[in-house]
Amino acid sequence: MVVLSHGVGYNKKLPDAGRRTPDAGRRTPDAGRRTPVFGLGADWLLSGGIPIADAMVFSHPEQISRLADSCPEAAPTAVLGGDPCFDRILAARHHRDRYRRALGVHPGQRLVLLNSTWNPTSLFGDAGPEDVLPHLLPRLTSELPTDEYRVAAVLHPNIWHGHGPGQVRLWLDRARRAGLALVDPLEGWRQALIAADVVLGDFGSVSYYAAACGTPVLLGATGLEALGASSPVAAFVRSAPRLDPYGALLPQLEKLLAEHRPLDGPAELTTSVPGRSAVLLRGLFYQLIGIAEPAAPAVLDPLPLPPYEPPLRTAPLRVLTRTAADGTVAVQRFAEARYEPDDADSEGHLAVHEDTLDPGVLGIADVIFRYGTADDVRLGSPQAWAAEVLDRHPSASLAAYVTGPRECDVLHRNGLRLRLTAASAGDPAAHASALHARLRTGSEVAELVAAGLTVRTGATVQRVRVTVVRDGTAGGARPGS
């Protein structure tokens, strides 16, 4: 038997059935004995004083040294085999831009990856000194400007298994309606980690891998009591920046990104043989079964390209716009109005997805939008949908049908039909809000068609072409418009 050791550094402390995290079967150490490191004690490794495994694979000699201290009888079975999971991450880092595009992260936007392991003292647990997640999760997707930050979450598979997908999605429903992406915990988390600009997590392996990649990490749960005191994970947790769950999130993230310096420990101690796990592990396996290795090179499966998952924000969006003298419209959108900055120079309006959970909000919306393909027969043409929406909701001034990451069709209540086409990917619903702001200031359509629309979201400036639509086709400005 072969045992692959992964991220060894946890004390023998497992979740109990009364917690929100799943039960793994608590085994209490004998009275008077030192609490062994999870996975390295005699209770796990020996039967009748004899090692149960023919080989125990580790990624770094430091782990083998701790095995010798914790259970010397099992030390002869230790083999250095590297870390295939981390090797797959290293091999795929050049696809970072693809993974970001798959998550709908557009240029200039930052991806915040929330992650939690499955211990009761984890970020998603409730056995710590304070239950951080209920304070954090609604604010993470509401407090950050939606066009400047994309938020995704990776939860340990045991969380999904212990509670069931329905319960997990129910807990996260509010955040998902505000734009949170839920990443596949088995096939998609490595790609999301590579794509991330900042990782907000706990003492689990995702946070440690992120630090090993040099990504800024902010810890919302430390769980030091669940870690071996001398382990690299414990050293990382003691040195990593801490989240203040009650403080404003945006200044904390900006400070972390501005002051970030990669930690030496995770990069050095994750594996001592980076890129060699396939060779070492295959050699070990064929040695144990007693046959010669194949002549073909030993390789790992590459990380697959995840499906495209742009943000779907059905929570009402409070939109602040400021139009500069040159016509540039600065746009900030927030999923909750209480988090918008106090800016006396900005104009505000309400933009709402047609499929919002609270349809009553549509009655006070200024802009109503949705996403879809131009040939969706269920909705009719984009312009037919827009006319129907404005007829149903007389308070709305503008309806926007987003047909892709660069384009949307809009209909103004005055009958004006326009198509907005951006030079690069983003969220065209924000461009529709910028158009709404320009039209409210009295801008002439001919001027917009001739000069285009310039939209600023955070530090990103987008040039948007404006064309008049007649009979479903885009053309020049109408005379006198």
Image: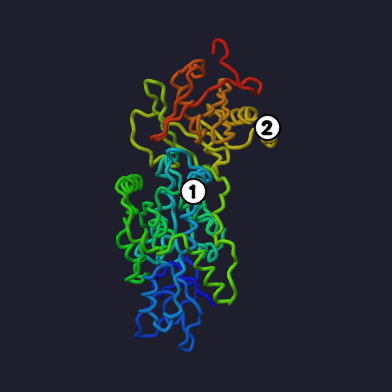
- Mark nearer the N terminus (2 vs 1): 1
Residue 109, numbered label = none
Which residue is pictured at 45% across the width and 63% down the height? 117
Q: Which of the image's four quarters has the C terminus?
A: top right
Residue occupying image coordinates x 47% and y 86%: 50
Q: Is residue 381 above or below residue 222?
A: above
Residue 167 visible in the displayed image: no
SS type, badge 1? loop
Farthest residue toward the right?
Answer: 377
Residue on which the image places disc 1: 180
Q: Tell me where residue 214 appears, x and y as whole percent.
A: 37, 53
Q: Is disc 2 surrounded by few (<14), some (14 to 19) or many (20+) residues within 10 Å?
A: few
Which quadrant is home to the N terminus?
bottom right
Residue appearing at x 43%, y 60% in the figure: 274
- Which structural element holds mark 2? loop
Is 149 placed left or right of 307 in the picture? left
Find residue 164 and report its horizontal and vertical position in percent: 56, 62
- Amino acid on which the number 2 mark rests in the picture: Gly
For this orientation, the residue located farthest to the bottom is: 48
Separation (CA) of disc 2 from disc 1: 29 Å
Q: Quick one: 347 or 48, which is closer to the camera?
A: 48
Q: Position of residue 71 (x, y in %)?
A: 40, 81
Q: Which residue is at a point 39% across and 25% down the rendered structure image?
A: 323
Taking 223 as reference, is 355 above or below it? above
Residue type, mark 1 in image: Leu
Residue at which label 2 appears: 380
Residue nearer the viewer, 106 or 134: 106
Please say whether residue 154 is visible from this viewpoint: yes
Label 1 crowd (10 A; few <14 / some 14-19 / many >=20): many
Figure check: 337 above or below 37: above
Quadrant of the image occupied by residue 14: bottom left
